[in-house]
């Protein structure tokens, strides 16, 4: 597989802050690759180093097997889409989208054809003459996208491009972005702090924390096999038992996590009798909180002294089901459904 991007041993400090701490990363041609992490974890700095807006203190950046560490941004065949669109306010949609072609001295019907083609792909046919101020947030982001795609970059970098949109529009744009990436077959490197967004769109994800990459893997593996407690807690809802509790309650000598959808509440003695006890971890919990979340209840149990356990209880067929706080339940999950963690 052709390597679209290779970062080797990248370090970048701002004064005493280590924004990037020994980053190694390889992205394949055509991948939708996300950099996911909390605010301040180094995602934007990483994009800037790839684009060439920031020089790393040491390490190497290669794009399609060419070392570009010392090559300026405009010669890297990489474009960036930002959250704030960065459109030219005085130019209309057509002029904004065609800008880079004009810089390349393209004009007349070849240029018009290219602009029409891309406007159709991003669903903006007919909006040619509007100014950015006459567009909605989602439309502006599509103009920004069209403008960055029109000169067919080898890699498109996107820094929280949907961050300014409301939830409904963001979800719609996620689907559109993914479709556009499929059509163009361009490698996308996508920065987000939203784990749901990263899980639903990416081929692979790098989880950033404090300038370091904690784990690089597919969404399914990041979710089901988090490598440590940071990743487990950052992605989705999970319950973590530290090493002491794991030993005390279950006789395990390692910390572990378990996902809420894997936990079963044993409401009756019959439920408990029905399972093969050798295959399950079984414990007792006191219900501390119960939230209605549409398709399920999110139930939080207190276990032992300081352990909390989240359970999603499906509401199929019984939307009005409720539980009293402080009720005690026996709770169980399959031994194979835990992920052991390096703390
Ligand atoms: P993210 O995009 O994940 O939120 P950034 O890459 O923007 O994180 O920032 C990583 C760290 O580097 C943060 O602690 C941030 O404050 C710091 N940082 C980023 N850019 C600069 C800069 N130009 N000068 C000083 N510190 C910076
Ligand atoms: Mg950022």
Image (cartoon, rainbow, N blue to C red):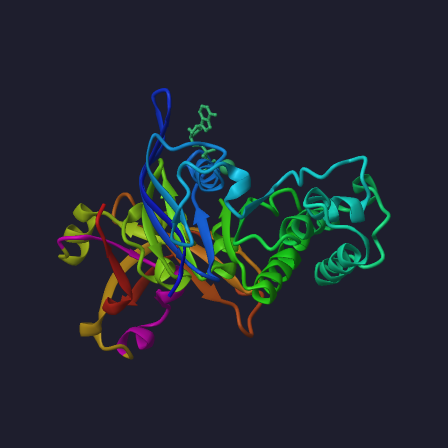
Q: Name the residue at 44% across, 47% down.
A: 36
Give the image location of residue 71, x and y in percent: 45, 38
Q: Residue furthest top?
A: 15
Depth check: give the residue in front, 190 or 120.
Answer: 120
Residue 196 highlighted magenta (yes or no): no
Give the image location of residue 156, x and y in percent: 54, 51
- Which residues are drawn in magenta? 253-273
Residue 257 highlighted magenta (yes or no): yes
Q: Name the residue at 45% across, 64% down.
A: 313
Q: From the viewer's perspective, tell me whether residue 148 is left or right of residue 213.
A: right
* Residue 150 versus residue 82 in the image, above or below: below
Depth check: give the residue in front, 211 or 337.
Answer: 211
Q: Name the residue at 53% across, 48% down.
A: 77
Give the image location of residue 5, x and y in percent: 41, 52
- Quarter of the image for the C terminus: give it: top left
Q: From the viewer's perspective, tell me whether residue 11 is left or right of residue 111.
A: left
* Residue 169 versus residue 45 in the image, above or below: below
**Is any atom of residue 110 visible in this view?**
yes
Depth check: give the residue in front, 196 or 142.
Answer: 142
**Is any atom of residue 308 visible in this view?**
no
Q: Quadrant of residue 270?
A: bottom left
How many tags in the picture? 0
Q: Name the residue at 77% across, 46% down.
A: 136
């Amino acid at each position: 597989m052709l390597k679209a991007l290779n970062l080797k041993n990248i370090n970048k400090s701002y004064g005493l802050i280590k924004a990037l701490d020994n980053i190694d990363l390889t992205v394949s041609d055509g991948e939708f690759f996300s950099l996911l992490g909390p605010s301040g974890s180094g995602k934007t700095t990483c994009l800037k180093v790839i684009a060439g807006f920031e020089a790393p203190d040491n390490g190497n950046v290669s794009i399609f097997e060419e070392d570009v560490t010392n090559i300026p941004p405009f010669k890297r065949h990489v474009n960036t889409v930002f959250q704030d669109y960065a459109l030219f306010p005085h130019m209309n949609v057509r002029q904004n989208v065609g800008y880079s072609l004009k810089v390349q001295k393209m004009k007349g019907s070849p240029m018009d054809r290219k602009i029409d083609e891309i406007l159709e792909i991003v669903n903006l046919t007919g909006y040619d003459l509007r100014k950015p101020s006459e567009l909605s947030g989602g439309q502006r982001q599509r103009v920004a996208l069209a403008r960055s795609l029109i000169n067919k970059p080898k890699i498109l970098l996107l820094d929280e491009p949907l961050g300014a949109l409301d939830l409904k529009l963001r979800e719609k744009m996620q689907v559109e972005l993914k479709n556009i990436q499929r059509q163009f077959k361009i490698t996308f490197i996508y920065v987000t702090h939203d784990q749901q967004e990263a899980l639903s769109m990416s081929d692979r994800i790098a989880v950033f924390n404090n300038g370091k990459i904690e784990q690089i893997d597919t969404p399914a593996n990041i979710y089901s096999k988090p490598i440590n407690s940071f990743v487990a807690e950052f992605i989705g809802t999970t319950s973590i038992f530290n090493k002491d509790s794991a030993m005390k309650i279950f006789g395990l000598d390692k910390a572990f996590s378990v996902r809420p959808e894997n936990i079963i509440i044993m409401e009756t003695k019959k439920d408990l009798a029905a399972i093969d006890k050798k295959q399950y971890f079984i414990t007792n919990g006191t219900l501390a909180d119960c939230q209605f979340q549409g398709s399920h209840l999110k139930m939080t149990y207190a276990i032992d002294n300081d352990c909390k356990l989240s359970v999603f209880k499906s509401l199929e067929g019984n939307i009005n089901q409720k539980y009293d706080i402080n009720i005690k339940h026996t709770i169980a999950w399959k031994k194979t459904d835990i992920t052991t963690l390096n703390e």
